[in-house]
Image (cartoon, grey):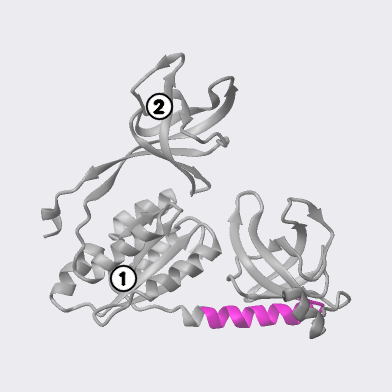
Amino acid sequence: MILLVADMQELKSNPSRPAMGSVLEAQLDRGRGPVATVLVRNGTLHVGDFFICGSVFGKVRAMISDRGEQLREAEPASPVEVLGLDSLPEVGDDFQVVTDTAKAQQIVRFRDQKAREASLAKSSRLTLEQLHKQLEAGEVKELPIILKTDVGGSAEVLSETLQKLSNEKVKVRVIHSGVGAINESDVLLASASNAIIIGFNVRPERNAAALAEQEKVDIRLHTIIYNLTDEIKRAMTGLLEPVFREVYRGKAEVRETFRITKVGSVAGCVVQDGVVTRDAEVRLLRDNVVVYTGKIASLRRFKDDVSEVRSGQECGITLENYSDVKQSDIIEAFVTERVATEVFA
């Protein structure tokens, strides 16, 4: 039907004109920097073209097809990954090839300034537990949130989902959303605007975690959208009664990987701090982004199976149902403990 309607209405594109399109997805890629998935709607996109994309300026350094092939040009109706952006665009931004780079940079600076003015936030420091208490006293009218996710599409969906949770008691306001690990700038913004930071499939950087503890900024980390929305709902309705909490045990850095017959991929690790236990749950972090959550299949010191490995010791770790472990990955161990409801009474 789409092809028939396009034929009847003579909907055609012009491959000879400069390319224009829409951003479908955007993410920070380790080693490649900001990467945007673009659908070319009209014209032909070439390697070397200059473009503007919302408030982002760039030059096409490389294009990759959905099959992972390097392309020199992309014709209309082609989805491609574009490398060469100065920063991350927003999902849904228009992508436009330009010939006058000086004028394009002026447009980008103007749009960036307008975006900064729109993102200015109010101030005050808050945790979900304090929100629960203040709701009972009828004090809080607004819940500011800073949202960080692994990809741009998740940021857009979660931002809309959280703001739709607003009710007559509390208005949920996402004052900033972005892609990548939670950094010091996010913590400082949260501190200044009294916001709660929510990380979806990402973790805070080491310095950011330390600063958040110092500034008493509340960081909530989630990998499942339903758990995230349920927690916000309970906070808003004054029913914040978490039954479980996550307790950090330790982390290990992958120094080397080995392929062993009948075992699979084994990560040769050094425990950086804490303790990694055989019965703990683990997250695999790559550039502070969660790529796997599960359990340890085996934990060894030399050739011996062990129940735990402490800070400074070397070990071999095999993950359950996951083998794509790479050098410099971080394996973070944690356990989930039951929390007495009286704590939040």
Other-residue count near label 2 (Cα within 10 Å), few / some / many at <14 / 14–19 / ≥20:
some
Residue 309 can be seen in this image: yes
Residue 126 can be seen in this image: no
Q: Which residues are magenta?
A: 97-115
Q: Residue 194 got which mark?
A: 1
Q: Is residue 304 above or below residue 344?
A: above
- Left or right, 172 with reference to 108: left
Res 50 → quadrant: bottom right
Q: x, y (%) of residue 39?
A: 71, 68
Q: Residue furthest right?
A: 16
Q: Residue 131 got which mark?
A: none
Res 323 → quadrant: top right
Q: Between 44 and 77, which is closer to the camera in this rendering?
A: 77
Q: Between 61 and 280, which is closer to the camera in this rendering?
A: 280
> Dot 2 corresponds to which residue?
312
User: Quadrant location of the N terminus?
Assistant: bottom right
Our reading of the magenta stretch's main secondary structure is helix
